[in-house]
Image (cartoon, rainbow, N blue to C red):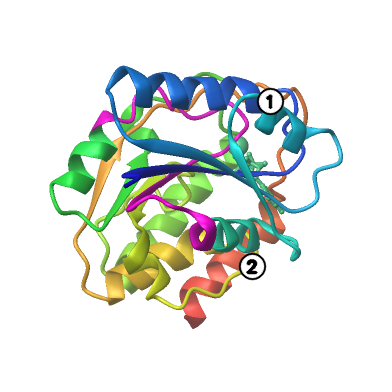
């Protein structure tokens, strides 16, 4: 039985993907955990899937575009009892997954990273996001009664079967908020753990469009 799937949504991350895969594998092997690494790709044209396979990861191709669509396809395809998901841009510490493993094994259904408590490297988060994320998180916490203070942290972990049962639908970046809202409303046990944020290793712009995606998150919080 595979206990953990490390799931990375990936859209053109040729510069950072190998680093992320090796870091995650290093962690899992050093702790002797039964794990697979799964890359959810829906349209990379920079050779990311080939890089992933060369580094021993499994790749799942998803037809539909979007961050949420990729993750939903990845959750379906995963073999692990637990899924630990994180960006493939080198910004998250796949070498420091202990707190996630411990909380999952301790019975938490959803474990969300908190970058403000874990430490944000200089230049790793735009100043607009440093204000916007806590603002949207306060709103979402109030609305969904979740203990989470960093609703947009890309590093999180959850029980696969419970996630599948939630009927998640969001195909875009709002998926990040939807999964917390849905777990919370299902009455599942949720906790957050500190996790550091590094500068990404891809040397180009984020896929996030601050105002468009920020507004979508806001709309989701108000209308879910
Ligand atoms: N498969 C897939 N991955 C995506 C898509 N959009 C973003 N990602 C991945 O999701 C992660 C987060 O995106 P990123 O641009 O780093 O967002 P930010 O960290 O919030 O600025 C990265 O690993 C991206 O490659 C998408 O449409 N499809
Ligand atoms: Mg990123």
The 10 Å Cα crowd at callout 2, few under 14, some 14 to 19, many 20 or more, is some
Q: Position of residue 20 (x, y in %)?
A: 55, 26
Q: Residue at x 71, y 25 (%)?
A: 202
Q: Position of residue 160 (x, y in %)?
A: 37, 60
Residue with the mark numbered 2: 171
Q: Is residue 129 above or below residue 200?
A: below
Q: Position of residue 132 (x, y in %)?
A: 52, 50
Name the quarter showing ligand 1.
Answer: top right
- Name the mark on residue 136: none
Which sits in the foreground, 103 or 205? 103
Specify whether residue 205 is in view.
no
The quarter of the picture where residue 142 lies is bottom left
Specify whether residue 217 is in view.
yes
Per the image, label 2 sits on a secondary structure element best described as loop
- The residue most toward the left is 106
Q: Is residue 126 left or right of residue 3?
A: right
**Magenta region, residue range:** 75-98
Residue with the mark numbered 1: 54
Q: Residue at x 38, y 66 (%)?
A: 163
The 10 Å Cα crowd at callout 1, few under 14, some 14 to 19, many 20 or more, is few
Nearer the viewer's eye, disc 1 or disc 2?
A: 1
Whether disc 2's CB lies below 8 Å from ligand 1 is answered no
Q: Position of residue 111 (x, y in %)?
A: 29, 49
Q: Is residue 171 left or right of residue 135?
A: right
Q: Earlier in the sequence, mark 1 or mark 2?
A: 1
Q: Residue at x 36, y 21 (%)?
A: 29
Which sits in the foreground, 81 or 24? 81
Q: CA distance from mark 1 to mark 2?
A: 28 Å
Q: Does residue 102 show up magenta in the picture?
A: no
- The residue most toward the right is 45
């Amino acid at each position: 039985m595979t206990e953990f799937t490390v799931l990375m949504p990936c859209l053109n991350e040729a510069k950072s993907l190998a680093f992320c895969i090796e870091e995650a594998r290093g962690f899992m092997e050093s702790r002797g955990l039964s794990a697979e690494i799964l890359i959810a790709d829906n349209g990379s044209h920079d050779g990311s899937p080939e890089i992933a396979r060369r580094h021993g990861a499994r790749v799942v191709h998803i037809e539909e575009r979007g961050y949420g669509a990729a993750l939903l396809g990845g959750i379906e395809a995963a073999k692990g009892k637990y899924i630990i998901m994180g960006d493939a841009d080198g910004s998250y510490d796949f070498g420091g997954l202990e707190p996630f493993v411990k909380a999952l094994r301790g019975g938490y259904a959803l474990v969300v990273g908190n970058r403000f408590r874990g430490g944000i490297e200089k230049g790793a988060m735009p100043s607009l996001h440093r204000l916007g994320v806590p603002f949207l998180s306060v709103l979402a916490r109030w609305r969904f009664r979740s203990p989470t203070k960093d609703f947009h942290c890309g590093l999180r972990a959850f029980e696969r079967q419970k996630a599948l049962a939630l009927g998640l639908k969001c195909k875009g970046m709002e998926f990040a908020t939807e999964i917390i809202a849905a777990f919370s409303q299902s009455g599942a046990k949720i906790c957050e753990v500190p996790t550091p944020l590094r500068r990404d290793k891809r040397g180009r712009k984020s896929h996030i469009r601050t105002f468009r995606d920020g507004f979508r998150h806001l709309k989701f919080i108000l209308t879910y």
